[in-house]
Amino acid sequence: MKKIHHIFGIGFMALSLTTAFGCEITSSKNQPLVAQAFTADGKEKPSNNTVKIALLLDTSNSMDGLINQAKAQLWDIVNKFTHAKCGNDARPKLEIALYQYGNDNLSPREGYIQQVLNFSSDLDEISEKLFSLSTNGGEEYCGEVISTSLKQLDWGKNQDQLKMIFIAGNEPFTQGKLNYKDAVIDAKEKDIIVNTIFCGNYQEGVNTDWKNGAILTGGEYMAIDHNQAVVYVTTPYDDVIIQLNAKLNGTYISFGSLGASKKALQAEQDTNAAAMEEVVVVKRAVSKSSRMYKNAEWDLVDASEKEDFDLAKINKDALPNELKGKSLPEIQTYIEDKKSERSKIQKEIQDLNEKREAYVARHQQENSKGALENAMLEAIQKQAARKNYTWE
């Protein structure tokens, strides 16, 4: 399963690259985080810089390896996507939704399908939901879960946005009353690309229509050994990054009704990562040091960066204990100090990660990525060039 490490990491990278029809080339330095595009009459178009990914995971008995790899590889996906750029250097936003299917614990009335998470950019929440998954035998209806995700999720009508589904499983794609062809054709009509990941022999996936399910929308078909262990390279920088991650958590100032629970969730997801492998903690720390990890709804440092932020309007009772009884200038100074500290720590992590990645590249076995991953990278780069996305 650990080979899905490569699939999800690359698959999601693909999806951030593959369909950016409206990616604007013109430079817009005053708006570094928003891709500005215009219609024929010169009016500004809505932002096309949101990538929407729906993960549809088979959670039947045989899929433990798949689920574990998805948990570990979330951070590879995020870290790859952090460096994606639109044509004018704008940085896209990433939203991920999660479904499970094929599990006896799910309702037969719903086709053994459950929406675990609606589209979200909250990385701690996405991690939490992945770790909540458990496997059990069941009926695996690929067409049904694709169709359900199309109906339940708000994919939007902006054709410039990049919208993709990744479905993974190991039973025939044809199972269930709903014809998978109807589901994937519906996806194509909504400008949503379906990518299929068969957990088993490549030819078996072809024979059971997994490949055809992808081809009908212009997506990628991939076959993986979902139980194959991935050999991670330990580096001299890992321990320092993990120590910095602990310091990074100390820069978060929780507030409001969500504050305490969200800060606890942050720590819980660090623990979940550590329970897998040390390298997963490192990769999560790198994600937390990037632009993708924002928590303005519960953290005063991130909230203070919003245009409409007004410290005076925050209920004093919603502040953490260390700020209660302090004046507004004192609170503002405290926030600025934490912001400065965080920025320094994040830069240290990013700098160390550059060295870490160079070390991994030097010590990784030449063929450790496998022919499948190399083929996917070539396809992704080709599609990215056509859609005006690049990677730093």
Image: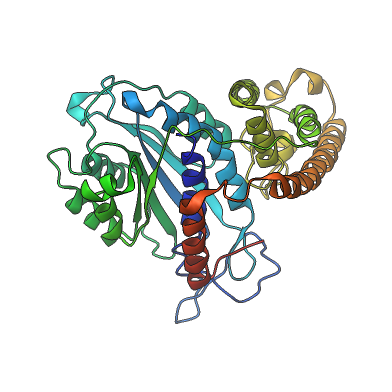
* Front residue of 40 and 284: 284
User: Against 230, is 384 above or below?
Assistant: below
Q: Which residue is pictured at 53% across the width and 59% down the height?
A: 49
Kindly identify the residue that appears in the image at 29 percent across and 59 percent down.
215
- Image quadrant of residue 59? top left
Residue 205 lies left or right of residue 50; in this view the side is left
Numbered label tally:
0
Residue 48 in view in this figure? no
The x and y percentages for residue 112 are 24, 28
| Image quadrant where one finds the N terminus | top left
Task: Assign the C terminus to one quadrant of the image.
Answer: bottom right
Residue at the far left in the pictured view: 177
- Relative to 36, say whether 354 is above or below: above
Viewed as shown, does residue 230 lie left or right of 312? left
- At which x and y percent is residue 340? 85, 41
Q: Is residue 60 visible?
A: yes
Tell me which colouring the rendered structure shows. rainbow
Q: Classify residue 279 as left or right of residue 58.
A: right
- Residue at the outermost front position: 366
| Point 54% across, 39% down: residue | 74
Q: Nearer the viewer, residue 216 or 261?
A: 216
Image location of residue 34, percent across then percent down = 60, 62
